[in-house]
Amino acid sequence: MKYDYLVVGSGLYGAVFARQAVQAGKTVLVIDKRSHIGGNIYTEKVAGVNVHKYGAHIFHTNNKKVWDYVTSVADFNRYTNSPVANYHGELYSLPFNMYTFNRMWGVTTPEEAAAKIEEQRRAAGITEPQNLEEQAISLVGTDIYEKLVKGYTEKQWGRDCKDLPSFIIRRLPVRLTFDNNYFNALYQGIPIGGYTKLIERLLEGIEVRLNTDYLEQKETLDALAGRVIHTGPIDAYFGYRLGYLEYRSVRFETEILDMENFQGNAVINYTDRETPWTRIIEHKWFEFGKNEEGEPIPQTVISREYSSEWKPGDEPYYPVNDEKNAALYAEYKALADREERVVFGGRLGEYKYYDMDAVIASALDLCEREL
């Protein structure tokens, strides 16, 4: 065998593991079926703008170990996520805060806002939320749920809010302050020069083969290494023999506009049901509208995002972590545990809605056990 480890997938999980393994003196081959490294955090330069090819990724964490790790590899800017909600042309602050409550109800004090939410929660008769709709109303009241949560969520998940589990929205930020920072995290930012630069540095000096489909060449590739770190879909690895795990997929319509500023913000969510897209990303504002030399970028690039049900051949984005899929994943996990040479990790390998910092933490934990 030529390598100690074959890493399937060059996203964050695979790249972090590969780097740590090489630093520990192991030989590593990284493969990816795509034509580029980075998985879904891949950024591509378009008209001078670092475009988030597979949707917006904003790094945020309270984990100092993870923050120290990524900032030792790449420089990060100080971007703070402050999205805006557009409901039929009415603009509201996300996260839900005093700006939102003032715009919605005309209240000016935290006490008035809290009273209004409590009044609407009581009127809805909710004590123990049983689904996403009830959870949302108990957090922010009926008005905000109807205008700013319901339409967006049903577009994103393709299901009625009453049919979605309450935990999906439990981390929804609701603040009786004027804080516009969506993530309540100590550390936040975007790699200067884009995420591809971060992955390039993680994989520096490591052999990478692109356009290489592991499952199509499994026997040949397995013969090259003693251990396999598999970051692809766990059900695909087993040939979907127990059935398909469900995902939501996303389609992007990206265009270059010959103007300096399209919407004035990196992220605007369209929360009404009638607008077909869920949000518009204006990529340049992730880096304050400037290139790496600090000069303003004259054009802009926007992406409209459309959510859809995943089907084979589509890119899987968000696992549908309901009871049915959790039970199916548990069956695949039991199969995976019997694979002596293979470790399954990352968003697809573990069928988890992972934030980037949690992916890195999980990969570093594996490194400690494995290396």
Image: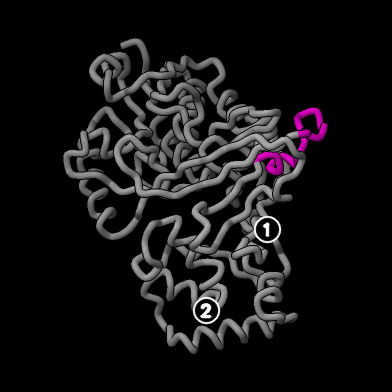
Q: Residue 293 appears at what percent x and percent y?
A: 80, 28
Q: Amino acid at mark 1?
A: Asn
Residues rendered magenta in the picture:
283-298
Q: Residue 264 appears at what percent x and percent y?
A: 73, 50
Q: How many marks?
A: 2
73 with respect to 172 (left or right): right
Q: Secondary structure at mark 2?
A: helix
Question: Is residue 291 on the magenta stretch?
Answer: yes
- Extreme residue toward the right, this view: 295
Q: Looking at the image, is mark 1 or mark 2 earlier in the sequence?
A: 2
Q: Which mark is residue 142?
A: 2
Residue drawn at point x = 60 percent, y = 65 percent: 87
Q: Secondary structure at mark 1?
A: loop
Nearer to the camera, 335 or 162: 162
Residue drawn at point x = 46 percent, y = 85 percent: 124
Looking at the rendered image, the quarter that the N terminus falls into is top left
Residue 80 visible in image: yes
Q: Which mark is residue 170?
A: none
Residue 26 figure quarter: top left
Q: Amino acid at mark 2?
A: Thr
Nearer to the camera, 261 or 13: 261
285 with respect to 4 (left or right): right
Question: Is residue 87 on the magenta stretch?
Answer: no
In the rendered view, would you say 153 is above or below 307?
below
Residue drawn at point x = 31 percent, y = 49 percent: 246
Q: Residue 334 appears at what percent x and percent y?
A: 21, 44
Give the residue number, with chain letter if any, for mark 1. 181
In the rendered view, would you say 347 is above or below 271?
above
